[in-house]
Image (tube, rainbow, N blue to C red):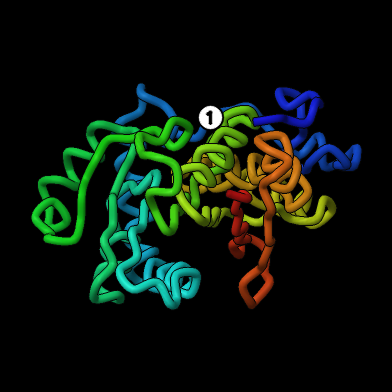
Amino acid sequence: MATEIFDIDGMPRGGPDASWLDRRLQTDRLEYLDRDDVDNRKRSIMRSLDRGERVFGIHRRLARILLDEVTGVRDPKILELGAGHGGLSRALLSMHPTARVTVTDIEPASVAAIAAGDLGSHPRATVREMDATAIDAPDGYYDLAVFALSLHHLPPPSAARVFAEGTRAAHKLVIIDLSRMPSLLHLVMVALALPLTIVPYWHDALISSLRAYSPSALRALARYADPAITVELRRQPPVLPGSPQIAVASAAR
């Protein structure tokens, strides 16, 4: 695998061509979700996210996007990386009668909770502990890999590894993550959100916006991982601040 030479460690979240302002609208500060010393706040945020995903049907909307990528595949093998509570995998299994889903997360506690629930006994689900940057699977084993609402948690070198590993282990890798807002709008949103950050959910929401990758950054990450990786970038309507961006990546075999 040949990689393009540039400073991946110092790449701005807005990409190599980010503006002066965009380069300042980022942070290395960790979300509560990424820390090990704030369990109560972590659980509070997870509950808020789970409620929001159920109320707004986010998992089913994302599952439809993903299943469109395997139309025509008879019994698709799908790998979910960073599954959290497993809600997206659950939606995929309920919406496709023959899909087989490997449900993974890097956190042992999350994997144990998933395995103890309905997915642990589902005949078409396999629950495993797995790192999205080091996928334990042969080349091309999966028809589709998905990493949803998680890439912004990773620094650029690790995010590039997700592109490399996802396109190695699966025919397609779908990255679904927060969109990075235009700089001036982002600045206004940061100013409005700052007073709310005493609430754990809004604390993490603000940091997520500052750590979100732009389309330029996603292309650069894939190019650094392997110049042979092609990336198709999409936005799902309506195009609003915080709406997801989607990158569909694949590598020539």
Find disc 1 in the rendering and name its residue.
Answer: 30
Using the rendered image of the protein, determine whether residue 56 is visible from the camera's viewpoint: no
Q: Residues within 10 Å of mark 1 (few under 14, many from 20)?
A: some
Which image quarter holds the N terminus?
Answer: top right
What's under tag 1, amino acid-wise?
Leu
Foreground of the two, 152 or 228? 228
State the image coordinates of residue 187 (x, y, percent, origin top left). 78, 48
Name the residue at 66% across, 68% down: 235
Q: Secondary structure at mark 1?
A: loop
Residue furthest front in the image: 253
State the image coordinates of residue 139 (x, y, percent, origin top left). 44, 42
From the viewer's perspective, is 211 left or right of 115? right
Name the residue at 68% across, 37% down: 226
Residue 99 vertical placement versus 81 (above, below): below
State the image coordinates of residue 14 (x, y, percent, origin top left). 77, 43
Image quadrant where residue 244 sits? bottom right
From the viewer's perspective, is 208 left or right of 25? left
Name the residue at 45% across, 76% down: 71
